[in-house]
């Protein structure tokens, strides 16, 4: 079995290995990234959707704190390093075809996750009644 | 304000409009897709992570049932059309920079979502104790 270009994780195997095996072989996209959904370990609330490259995932697994890849800044991102909103990982899961991660975290500092100051990035509901979709903050 | 190439949604505006506005202007990626996290409306469990193009999102908003873009098949995908696992949408949300969607659904049929037969695609936990990560079904 080969490894990813970074050598940090085994390259994805067969469909059966991917779906039923015990080997974590994340399927990073053409951009080298995998989607991560981050939820509050206590409430289950979805806090954010972000991305990890192999190095970010390896650091997260190694340290137990969330590291992402910042697409806007083009760099590894230790979530909370400047804001104090460190995310301590209590559980990580992977989906059937290993192209998405689910991470349950406890958030330090003021408990926020979103750069707008909110606790969750999903602070707007899409309302479809009336003339087309509108966003409502609630 | 322009529209997306498909004309189905307004093109993204300024950062302030994107983050605090009432206009849904999804930021589809270079591949024309946006990530959607789908959860069980009753339990909050994360069921799957999939993708929508503009047409899939428009059909979802219009019909109240989940439509995705199948990357493997390269076609619009009315979830449950063949399996009976239709997803009826009870709420949709969008994140701060409008590049991710959150959808709460009620699943018909046998209540499953994953093509492996499980209820959720996230049926494996990543265990980090011992010699590197291992996947555990639980």
Image (spheres, coloured by chain):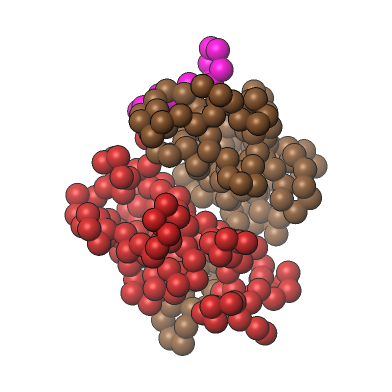
Chain colours: A brown, B red
Is residue B87 positioned above or below A23 on the image? below
- State whether residue B23 appears in this view: no
**Horizontal and vertical percent for residue A98?**
47, 37
Is residue A5 positioned above or below B27 on the image? above
Q: Residue at x 52, y 56 (%)?
A: B35
Looking at this rendering, what residue extends furthest in the top direction? B130
**Horizontal and vertical percent for residue B10?**
60, 79
Residue A71 lies in magenta, yes or no?
no
Q: Which image quadrant for residue A108?
A: top right
**Horizontal and vertical percent for residue B109?**
19, 54
Q: Residue at x 35, y 62 (%)?
A: B77
Name the image quarter holding the C terminus of chain B.
top left
* Count of numbered tags: 0
Q: Which image quadrant for residue B19?
A: bottom right
Residue B135 lies in magenta, yes or no?
yes
Residue A75 left/right relative to A99: right
- State whether residue B80 appears in this view: yes
Q: Residue at x 73, y 69 (%)?
A: B15
Q: Which residues are magenta?
A: B127-138
Foreground of the two, A9 or B128: A9
Name the image quarter holding the N terminus of chain B.
bottom right
Foreground of the two, A15 or A64: A15
Foreground of the two, A14 or B110: A14
**Horizontal and vertical percent for residue B58?**
44, 74
Q: Which image quadrant for residue A32?
A: top right
Looking at this rendering, what residue extends furthest in the bottom direction? A131
Residue A135 left/right relative to B118: right
């Amino acid at each position: 079995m080969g490894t990813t270009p970074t050598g940090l994780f085994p390259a994805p195997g067969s469909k059966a290995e991917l779906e039923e095996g015990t080997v974590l072989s994340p399927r990073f996209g053409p951009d080298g990234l995998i989607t991560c959904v981050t939820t509050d370990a206590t409430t289950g609330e979805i806090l954010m959707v972000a991305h990890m490259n192999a190095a970010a995932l390896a650091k997260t697994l190694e340290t137990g704190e969330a590291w992402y890849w910042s697409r806007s800044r083009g760099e590894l991102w230790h979530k909370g390093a400047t804001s104090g909103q460190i995310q301590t990982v209590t559980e990580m899961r992977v989906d059937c075809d290993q192209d998405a991660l689910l991470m349950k975290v406890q958030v330090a500092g003021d408990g926020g996750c979103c750069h707008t100051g909110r606790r969750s990035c999903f602070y707007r509901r899409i309302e479809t009644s009336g003339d087309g979709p509108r966003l409502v903050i609630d």
